[in-house]
Image (spheres, rainbow, N blue to C red):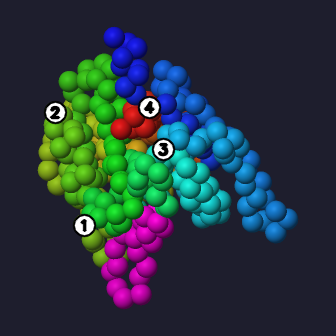
Amino acid sequence: MEKKEKAGKKQVLLFHCVESEELARKVADHSDGLIQLQSIKWRSFDDGFPNLFINNAQDIRGQHVAFLASFSSPSVIFEQLSVIYALPRLFVASFTLVLAYFPTGSFERMEEEGDVATAFTMARILSNIPISRGGPTSLVIYDIHALQERFYFGDHVLPLFETGIPLLKRRLCELPESEKVVVAFPDDGAWKRFHKLLDNFPAVVCTKVREGDKRIVRLKEGNPSGCHVVIVDDLVQSGGTLIECQKVLAANGAAKVSAYVTHAVFPKRSWERFTGNGGSDKGFTYFWITDSCPHTVKAIGNQAPFEVLSLAGSIADALQI
């Protein structure tokens, strides 16, 4: 029975960028031997442009191939795109790109003429990945910022939109007094994205209102009093909204406040606002993140209140689709 089940699954050769190496190893460890790691020589010429070499290129012909990317900064995107565009052309049976964090997702709209919606630009670049022998590229993205961005991609890629919420739900069920957990959404956008995935928990919704030149967080609906309230959003940058939301929830009687984001972007080490005296002692009991942004996970380590919920098992499953 086990042989039949394994025979029905794909053997996948997984390439990865430098900063995703640890996550790639975890993905392979979750695959019961179905995913084998491959390597690339990431080098640069004297002028700084990439000098790349895909090892064992002839051996991947006819194989299912995947690439685990991390577009953590503009400086690494070009070298990874060069590999991403090359792999499908090596006569592979199929090609899957895993880009857990879609980095320009929050720049998806124009508010005035002249604004550049770079989320659309990135989607166009990824939509032009060459077709492999097996057809269009499968593109795996977790918790994309705006739901309408799924329509930005062209017909040459098949976007697969996954979520980290099952990892959070599993962790919440492990908590003592899990029956006292209430989920809070920091704004209407977070509610739209996640409320159906978390409808088995009572909900609190916050909102931002403008007072003069400032945008103030207010409680819109729900009752956090006496509960362990978990703020849920897709990503965090400076963390300012989460901190203001925590203050409002605590002022309205929340016994504990924690947070979850799929993408811990935290530019300029802004995660430091949540550690030390401002962390677990009087701010956030837990701050759950995934490893979609490997550079952040490496920088944070195991510092409280942070706890990493790995996407590795979910990615391993997605590569079997």
**Could you classify mark 3 by the number of other residues whose Cα lies within 10 Å: few (under 14), some (14-19), or many (20 or more)?**
some
Residue 313 occupies which quadrant of the picture? top left
Q: Nearer the viewer, residue 31 or 252?
A: 31
Instruction: Kindly identify the amino acid type of the residue bearing the numbered disc 1.
Output: Val
| Closer-to-camera residue (275/291) | 291
List the residue tagged with mark 4: 10
Question: In the image, what residue occupies the spot 28% across and 72% down?
Answer: 211
Tell me, for residue 93, which label it has, or none: 3
Report if the CB atoms under discs 1 and 4 are less than 8 Å apart.
no
Mark number displayed over residue 209:
1
The CA distance from mark 4 to mark 2 is 34 Å
Which circle, 4 or 3, is nearer the viewer?
A: 3
Tell me which segment is drawn in magenta.
106-128
Q: Secondary structure at mark 4?
A: loop
Answer whether labels 2 and 1 touch (C-beta < 8 Å): no
Q: Which labelled disc corresponds to residue 317? A: none
Category of crowding for the residue at label 4, using alpha-carbon neighbours closer than 10 angstroms: few (below 14), some (14–19), many (at least 20): some
Disc tally is 4
Give the residue number, with chain letter if any, for mark 2.
200
Query: In the image, 150: left or right of 71?
Result: left
Which badge, 1 or 3, is on the more N-terminal residue? 3
| Kind of residue indicated by mark 4 | Lys
